[in-house]
């Protein structure tokens, strides 16, 4: 599982969703959370944050730069190739999920997000990525 000091970036154009995710993460013991309103804003945050972001939770549909566009940008940059990236989406269609997997998503969560689901996906992602605390 990711440690409580893991630096997490929440990317969502809806402030309510960012707050909800931040609160769920806090209830799981995470306290080091950064927020971004779209993929472009997230890209800036990823390039400016010290210590570096260690996990991205990104919405799929956002203006300016979608979650998958951000993911492709990250996977094309050697600094972020292995950065854990969980796509959060209301789109349950197989084509959407396949697009995310093919782009390099570490995992995905379907909305509405529940704390237990978030915890399970974080645990599965950490295990898949070989992250131990």
Image (cartoon, rainbow, N blue to C red):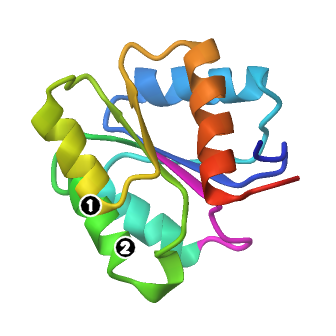
Q: Quadrant of the N terminus?
A: top right
Mark 2: which secondary structure? Answer: helix
Other-residue count near label 1 (Cα within 10 Å), few / some / many at <14 / 14–19 / ≥20 = some
Query: Mark 2 highlights which residue?
Result: 75
Q: CA distance from mark 1 to mark 2?
A: 8 Å
Is residue 115 part of the magenta span, yes or no?
A: no
**Which residues are drawn in magenta?**
49-57
Q: Is residue 106 left or right of residue 129?
A: left
The reply, left or right, for residue 16 in relation to residue 62 is: right
Depth order, front residue of 18/2: 2
Residue at image position (46%, 87%) is 78
Total count of labels: 2
> Which residue bears the numbered disc 1?
103
Coordinates of residue 103 in the picture (x, y in percent):
26, 61
In this view, 31 is above or below 81: above
> Circles 1 and 2: CB distance less than 8 Å?
yes
Depicted 5 relative to depicted 119: above or below: below
Secondary structure mainly formed by the magenta segment: loop
Q: Residue at x 68, y 29 (%)?
A: 25
């Amino acid at each position: 599982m990711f440690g409580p000091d893991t630096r997490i970036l929440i990317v969502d154009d809806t402030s309510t969703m960012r707050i909800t995710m931040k609160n769920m993460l806090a209830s799981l013991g995470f306290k080091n959370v950064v927020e971004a309103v779209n993929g472009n804003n997230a890209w800036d945050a990823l390039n400016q944050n010290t210590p570096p972001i260690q996990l991205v939770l990104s919405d799929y549909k956002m203006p300016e730069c979608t979650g998958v566009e951000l993911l492709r940008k990250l996977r094309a940059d050697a600094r972020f190739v292995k950065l854990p990236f969980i796509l959060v989406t209301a789109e349950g269609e197989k084509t959407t999920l396949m697009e995310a997997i093919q782009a390099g998503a570490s995992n995905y969560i379907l909305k509405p997000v529940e704390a237990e689901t978030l915890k399970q996906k974080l645990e599965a992602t950490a295990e898949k990525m070989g992250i131990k605390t």
